[in-house]
Image (cartoon, grey):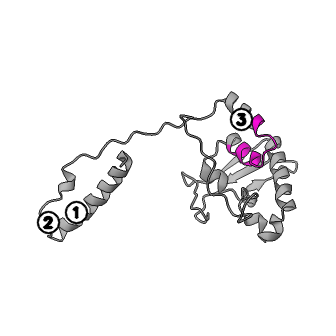
Amino acid sequence: LSARTVKHLLVTLRSALESAVKDGLIPQNVALLGDPPSVAKRQMKTFSAEEARAFLEAIAGDRLEALFSTAIALAYRQGEALGLQHRDWHTGLGDTPFVEVVPREDHPHGLRVKNGSFRRIYISDELDRLYGEYLWQLCDAGADVAVGDLDGWWVFVNLSREPRFAASGHFISFSADA
């Protein structure tokens, strides 16, 4: 078992034995006598500016270009990017375009904004244009008809597999060691 799993099991065991002590079933919680294993913190690797530019150039035209461009440009976490609804994206229309990060508890995969706070992020005209192209792609695929209320629906959805237009649950992950 991994150190993280052992630590979680120890927390559960300590809680159960503490209840047994309170109920008078055992005299002492022996799980408190041992130290939990140390769990190494995972190091997150982020793109440098050059790596981000190269990545975005490499995925130009890909079906996930809008998702990854948004995530990189806005330094979004997974829950923020995949939790975007169309009503959160405010196209420029003569003003500076922006995206709102809205804390929600209703994502079908349980994704949430990590710190739980609302914020507004102003975006480039280029990112706004990319979103517009992606939105046309969704409409061409029939998303506007299939989901009914597109404005209240998730921006980044399944386009290439069933169930079509379902909310995405995760980014493609890459190991920091890769």
Q: Which residue is mark 2?
A: 26
If you read the primary sequence from the N terminus, does the residue marked by circle 3 or circle 2 appear first? Answer: 2
Position in image of residue 65 (x %, y %): 76, 45
| Residue type marked 2 | Ile
Direction from residue 109 to residue 10 in the image, left or right? left
Crowding at label 2, few (<14), some or many (≥20) Cα neighbours within 10 Å? Answer: few
- Part of the protein shown in magenta: 57-71
- Pick the residue in front: 122 or 146: 146
Disc 1 marks a residue whose amino acid type is: Leu
Q: Are marks 2 and 1 in contact (CB under 8 Å)?
A: yes
Look at the picture and state if 48 lies above or below 107. above
In this picture, is 170 found above or below 60? below
The foreground one among 32 and 119 is 32
Residue at (33% x, 41% y) in the render: 38
Overall secondary structure of the magenta stretch? Answer: helix
Residue 8: which disc? none
- Dot 2 falls on a residue whose secondary structure is loop
Q: Residue at x 80, y 50 (%)?
A: 131
> Would you say 125 lies left or right of 67 here?
right
The residue singled out by tag 1 in the image is: 17
Within 10 Å of the Cα at label 1, are there few (<14), some (14-19), or many (20+) other Cα atoms? some
The residue depicted at 59 percent of the width and 41 percent of the height is: 174
Q: Nearer the viewer, residue 65 or 128?
A: 65
Q: Residue visible at 43% across and 39% down?
A: 41
Q: Residues within 10 Å of mark 3 (few under 14, many from 20)?
A: some
Q: Which residue is mark 3?
A: 55
